[in-house]
Structure formats: C-alpha cells, structure tokens
C-alpha cells in the first residue's frame, strides 16, 4: 500500500464508516425510539437521565462528523515526523469511533421502549466495550499511518558505552522507589473500600482498581541484558514492559521533566501512538529509539550505564 492509499484509508474510509453507521441507525430506528431518549445509565446499570431525541441525534452526529473531519485534515499533513501523523489520526479516530459506538449502543438500549425509563439496563462493564473497540480501530489506524512518517536524520551525538568486549555477556539492573504513588494510590484505594461498604459494588470496585493501578508505580525494576530491556512494575514486577534488543536502534541518556510528557506514570502508548514513557520523577532517563520510528523513555538512576550496556549489546548483536 503506497502513501496515497494509506491516506485515503485513514482520512476517508475509516472516518466514513462510523458516521454512516450512526446516521443509518438513527434513520432506520427513529420510529422505534422513545422521545425523550435515555441518555445516561448509573452504576447499577439502570437509565437515570434523558434527552430530547432530536437534540441527541444532532449532538452525536455533529461530534462524530467533527472528529472525522479532524482525522481527514490530519491525514493530509505532508512530510510528517513521528508521531505527528499517527498520533493525530489515532486520537481523532478514538474520539470518533467511541462516540459513534456509544450512540449506537444507546439506541439499541432504547429500542421499542415505551419511555426512556423503560430502556434496557446497561451494565457498567458493558459500557467499556465501545471504548475497547474504538481503541482497537485507533491502534490499527496508527499502524497504517506510521509508514508515512519520515524521521529526520538524528544529529550526531555521542552515545554512551560501557566498553563491552566482543563475545562478553553482561546484565544491568536498576530499581527505583518513589513515594507519591503510595500516598495518592493509597488514598484512592481506601476511598474505594469505603464506597464498597457504603455506596455499592460498582463505584467501590472502580476506585479500588484505580488505586491499585497507581500503587504499582511506587517502584519499578529495570533490567538490561542480551534480550533487551524489561521494566517491571510494583513489588511483584508485574505488569511488565519488554523491549527486545533487535528492536532497539540506539539508547541515549536524556533529562526529562514530567510536565513535558503529560505527567507522572505510564504516558502514551507504543502500539497506538508510537511513543511511551515511564515517568516517576524528573531527571535522567533512558531514551530508546526503536525501529519503525517508535520511542520509549524510562526514568531510572544510573541511566548512562544502562544505555551504554544496551548500545554495546545491540552493536554486538548486529555484528553477529
């Protein structure tokens, strides 16, 4: 597939599908929908709010159409560098497909209801399905767009090295502990336990899970060896991010500020945006330039030794 075909797919075909599906759903089911229509469901899965059917149709179609126009405009960018194109069209696609699928799900729940109060229940877990489907499409769009991007030549820079001899094997391990996830995640976790006993299972479980996700960033363990780089999160080293050695083009040491990467924690997505960063504090970090124009950053102490080890291992692997 050449660049022109890729642009037509991500900027025309993919945006038209959810827009046509949403407009078609309204047109086909209009006479079977209550007016007003149920537009919101509570944690118990029951409808708890409504909106005029015409207003709902106009609002949802306008949002989906606007996001589709955004994807189309982004697809026209000339000579983009990573991730200018893939990130833009992925985010526009995620927004467009999420709203289109949410709108269609809402229509299905309202079909043949005598009034919006009689709309079908929508369990909270089912409400996550449109987001997951939209994220899958956005990831596919980013993958299609990425070959269009052209990375500018990297200025000559001295890459770190540990002087690894040919045939020599070495491994490096670094562990970092920070306190902010303990306070922040612990507060959310305790609040979730309180909601479990006072409000209900849905909101309490949601907060407990959210707090647990924050707590895993209280510590990370970074391992560099002949397989590449691995980042383990939390006391059990899980979940884990792995970057195979043959994917790494170069490793450098940079100084990062959380604000420049959207804050603390795991930011971005290698699969969706081609960029990801594990930011636990400001200061030195390893920057991995990966094949396909992707980039991964992780803050860790003694980043120079880790990056130098990766460079030597990658060079030895390329020569073998």
Image (cartoon, rainbow, N blue to C red):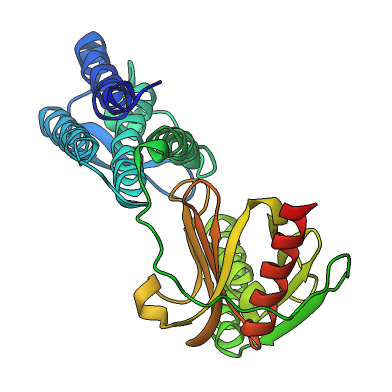
Q: Is residue 45 above or below residue 283?
A: above
Q: Quadrant of residue 68?
A: top left
* Horizontal relation, residue 255 to residue 308: left or right: left
* Horizontal relation, residue 15 to residue 222: left or right: left
Q: Quadrant of residue 58?
A: top left
Question: Nearest the camera: 178 or 127?
Answer: 178
Residue located at (28% from left, 38% from top): 39
Q: Is residue 90 above or below residue 313?
A: above
Position of residue 278 measured from the top left corner of the image (x, y, whole percent): 55, 71
Position of residue 259 measured from the top left corner of the image (x, y, whole percent): 36, 79
* Horizontal relation, residue 235 to residue 193: left or right: right
Question: Nearest the camera: 252 or 113?
Answer: 252
Q: Please tell me how many numbered marks the rendered image carries.
A: 0
Position of residue 224 measured from the top left corner of the image (x, y, whole percent): 75, 70
Position of residue 211 measured from the top left corner of the image (x, y, whole percent): 58, 71
Question: Nearest the camera: 95 or 211?
Answer: 95
Question: Nearest the camera: 25 or 171?
Answer: 171
* Horizontal relation, residue 63 to residue 141: left or right: left
Task: Name the quarter where the N terminus is drawn.
Answer: top left
Q: Quadrant of residue 12?
A: top left
Residue located at (39% from left, 68% from top): 155
Q: Determine if residue 281 is in view.
A: no
Q: Determine if residue 248 is in view.
A: yes
Residue located at (19% from left, 36% from top): 76
Residue located at (55% from left, 74% from top): 252
């Amino acid at each position: 597939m050449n660049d022109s075909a890729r642009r037509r797919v991500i900027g025309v075909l993919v945006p038209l599908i959810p827009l046509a599906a949403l407009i078609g759903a309204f047109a086909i089911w209009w006479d079977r929908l209550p007016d007003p229509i149920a537009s919101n469901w509570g944690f118990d899965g029951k409808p708890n709010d409504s909106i005029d059917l015409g207003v709902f149709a106009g609002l949802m179609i306008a949002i989906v159409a606007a996001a589709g126009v955004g994807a189309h405009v982004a697809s026209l960018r000339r000579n983009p560098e990573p991730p200018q194109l893939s990130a833009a069209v992925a985010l526009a696609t995620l927004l467009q497909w999420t709203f289109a699928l949410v709108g269609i799900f809402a229509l299905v729940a309202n079909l043949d209801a005598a009034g919006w109060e009689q709309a079908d229940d929508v369990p909270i877990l089912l409400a996550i399905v449109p987001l997951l489907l939209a994220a899958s499409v956005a990831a596919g769009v980013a993958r299609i767009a990425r070959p269009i991007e052209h990375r500018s030549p990297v200025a000559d820079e001295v890459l770190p090295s540990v002087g690894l001899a040919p045939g020599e094997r070495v491994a490096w391990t670094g562990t970092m502990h920070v306190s902010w996830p303990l306070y922040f995640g612990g507060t959310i976790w305790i609040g979730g336990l309180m909601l479990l006993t006072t409000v209900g299972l849905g909101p309490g479980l949601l907060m407990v899970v959210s707090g647990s996700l924050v707590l895993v960033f209280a510590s990370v363990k970074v391992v560099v060896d002949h397989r590449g780089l691995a980042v383990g999160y939390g006391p059990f080293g899980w979940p884990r991010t792995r970057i195979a050695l043959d994917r790494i083009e170069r490793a450098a040491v940079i100084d990062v500020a959380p604000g420049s990467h959207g804050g603390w924690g795991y930011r971005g997505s290698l699969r969706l945006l081609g960029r990801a960063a594990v930011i636990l504090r400001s200061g030195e970090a390893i920057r991995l330039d990966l094949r396909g124009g992707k980039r991964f950053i992780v803050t860790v102490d003694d980043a120079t030794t880790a990056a130098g080890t990766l460079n030597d291992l990658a060079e030895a692997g390329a020569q073998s």
